Amino acid sequence: MPTIRETLRDAARRLEAAGVPDARDDAALLLSHVTGEPQLNLRADPERPVSPVALAAYEALVSRRARREPLQYITGEAWFMGLCLKTAPGVLIPRFDTETLCQQAMERMNGAERVLDLCTGSGALAVAIAGTFPQARVLAGDISDTAARLARENAARCGADVEVRLGDLFAPFAGERFDIIVSNPPYIPAGALKSLQEEVRREPALALDGGPDGLDFYRRIIKEAPGYLVPGGWLLLEIGSDQGAAVCGLMAKDYREIERYSDLNGLSRVVAGRIRDGVYTDHAAEDRP
Ligand code: GLN
């Protein structure tokens, strides 16, 4: 029987040859996932043999990873703001980058706000906010039924009170007003989708494709949000690192206190702004003939 050391070495070589970015880390993580043993245990005792049953299961997962399936789809989980969320093919994997948006939203909360998370995907933002502020009323929406179901599952799994509705952007929230609206919408320019990392191309285009210039969803959200914000309410958006000026420009007319925030890599990652006084859209009126 091969030892833990040999097993990890062989897997890391295979993953490396397949072009997997963090081959050694992923090899160790998958072995820990298969055996149910913390990585520290495995490292502490590398000469221990790996059982044939564990080895067979491990080989299957390593093969999937070598085909560039995202690690988080294979393990079925991803961490976000200290929460272990469930992942599923067909739904964008929560990213560390998005914690910047989450933190900025949380800094604007006292606890009793009504919060809306548009394009919630796995529910990461909504679940983290609701879990931290149990007095808040947190709603979330997504156009994908697979995403809406996963978001509900993640809320239940984390004991967070989130109401998830299915529909296109604001459509399921007619007649409601929020203190804070957050969104990590699709923002990759359509033409750039093909050149994304292999793993990202396994994620749903629906969650990534922001139209010809990547700004389609910002245009819609920024235009429609005044109909769903209370006076002084905040809109916070995750952005691609080169979209800051464009998104700030789109917000200039109806929002004030517009700020950009960077992630830990120093890249622009969030734009936030408050609705200007007097900008009030009665969206119910828009629906009348
Ligand atoms: N940050 C993601 C990526 O670079 C994109 C997420 C999105 O479009 N909302 O893959």
Image: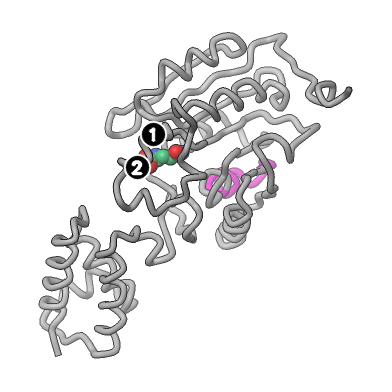
Drawn side of residue 63 relative to residue 95, left or right: left
Residue for badge 1: 191
Considering only vertical position in the picture, is 154 above or below 49? above
Based on the picture, tell me whether residue 135 belongs to the magenta stretch.
Answer: yes
Residue for badge 2: 194
Quadrant containing ligand 1? top left
Q: Which structural element holds mark 1?
A: helix
Residue 21 pos. (x, y %):
21, 53
Quarter holding residue 137: top right
Considering only vertical position in the picture, is 233 above or below 12? above
Residue 246 pos. (x, y %):
44, 17
- Residue at 19% over, 61% down: 18
- The three-letter code of the residue at mark 2 reads Lys
- Residue at 44% over, 25% down: 213
- Residue at 43% over, 29% down: 239
Q: Which residues are magenta?
A: 127-138
Q: Disc 1 vs disc 2: Cβ atoms closer than 8 Å?
A: yes
Quarter holding residue 136: top right
Residue projecting furthest to the right: 289
Residue 245 pos. (x, y %):
41, 15
The answer for how far apart the CA atoms under marks 1 and 2 are is: 7 Å
Drawn side of residue 100 relative to residue 265, left or right: right
- Residue at 67% over, 43% down: 139
Residue 43 pos. (x, y %):
17, 71
